[in-house]
Amino acid sequence: VDQEIASQPECWRRAAEVVATGAAGELPQAGERVAVIGCGTSLYIAQSYAVLRERAGQGETDAWAASEFPTGRGYDRVVAITRSGTTTEVLDALRNTPARTVAITADGTTPVKDAADALIVLDFADERSVVQTRFATTTLTLLRAHLGDDVEPLCAKAFELLTQPLPDDAVNRTQFTFLGAGATVGLANEAALKLREAAQAWTESYPGMEYRHGPISITDERSLVWVFGPAPAGLVDEVKATGAAVRATDNDAQVELVLAQRLAVELARARGLDPDHPRNLERSVIL
Ligand code: F1P
């Protein structure tokens, strides 16, 4: 997983090339009503992209856990994210929707190739670790590049964070809460999932404003509260008053996620766990 984490800036550049060369032509057109579906990590990337696309004025965009996808709803296009291309709920949703479908996957030889109308294969971002890191962020980069985002500054910042120290004393904390807003909520969810999967850590994630409505009660001096994207006014002071450590920066949340991935790995090793093979989890969940 270390190498997979470290190779992210390079993979992001390649994703931008995929878009530049027109190979992502099946991604949604402006004005289409779009659903983005996935499970676990792939769902959280879908959540982030849905907000980005809608805020970019490209059209109504909803993210769904594939298991909850209302197949009868009138979407113009469904975008499925699935590294393995074998996840049962994703395949079922693709087979049952009347909408035009495109799947983003790491392996174009799996059942998703028949379930989706079109495929975008990011094989260069595939992974050996069960825990997803670079496939997820490379998919998000592809989608962001398609919306017109400049990928290069993200790569440069990610390179920096690959060697930066982890947040102070983070490895010794016992509770981790990730907060986001808008497009960063999905990334906060993904960071929390990384620590859960790799390190069996107690993690939570919320929209920053929602966290104030109850979840802050679990925060104390053993917690690290990590804000992805701009912090809502007053939040950092409220968290500090609990005694928790807070990390809030101006960094793009996708780049902060890289640091959170590194924390997940370090935390796993500090706890004597193998970050590549989480308890009770396989590369693909097939039901
Ligand atoms: C997604 C998934 C992840 C999980 C783990 C295994 O599958 O189940 O949610 O965290 O990494 O894969 P996929 O549909 O993207 O292959």
Image (spheres, rainbow, N blue to C red):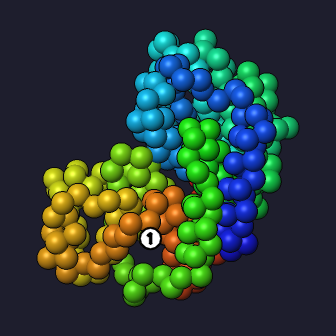
Q: Residue at x 56, y 69 (%)?
A: 157
Work out which quarter of the rendered image holds the C terminus and state it. top right
Between 27 and 66, the one lying in front of the other is 27
Q: Secondary structure at mark 1?
A: loop
Above or below for 268 versus 78: below
Q: Is residue 240 above or below residue 252?
A: below
- Which of the 4 image quadrants contains residue 6? bottom right
Query: Which residue is at the front of the view, 202 or 243?
Result: 243
**Residue at 22% across / 69% down in the picture?**
236
Quadrant in which the N terminus is drawn: bottom right
Percent from the top left, x then y, of residue 97? 59, 16
Residue 143 sits in which quadrant?
top right
Residue 259 location (% of width, % of height): 52, 72
Q: How many marks?
A: 1
Q: Is residue 188 visible?
A: yes
Q: What amino acid is found at the position of numbered circle 1 in the picture?
A: Ala
| Residue 100 spot, x, y in % from top left | 64, 17
Q: Residues within 10 Å of mark 1 (few under 14, many from 20)?
A: many
| Quarter occupied by residue 286 | top right
The relative height of residue 285 versus residue 71 in the rendered view (above or below) is below
Percent across and percent down for residue 127 are: 74, 58
Cβ of mark 1 under 8 Å from ligand 1: the answer is: no
Is residue 76 shown left or right of residue 123?
Answer: left
Tell me what residue is drawn at x 60 percent, y 15 percent: 99
Q: Residue at x 50, y 41 (%)?
A: 49
Would you say residue 86 is visible in this rendering?
no
Q: Nearer the viewer, residue 74 or 253?
A: 253
Identify the residue at the far right of this view. Answer: 109
Q: Which residue is mark 1?
A: 201
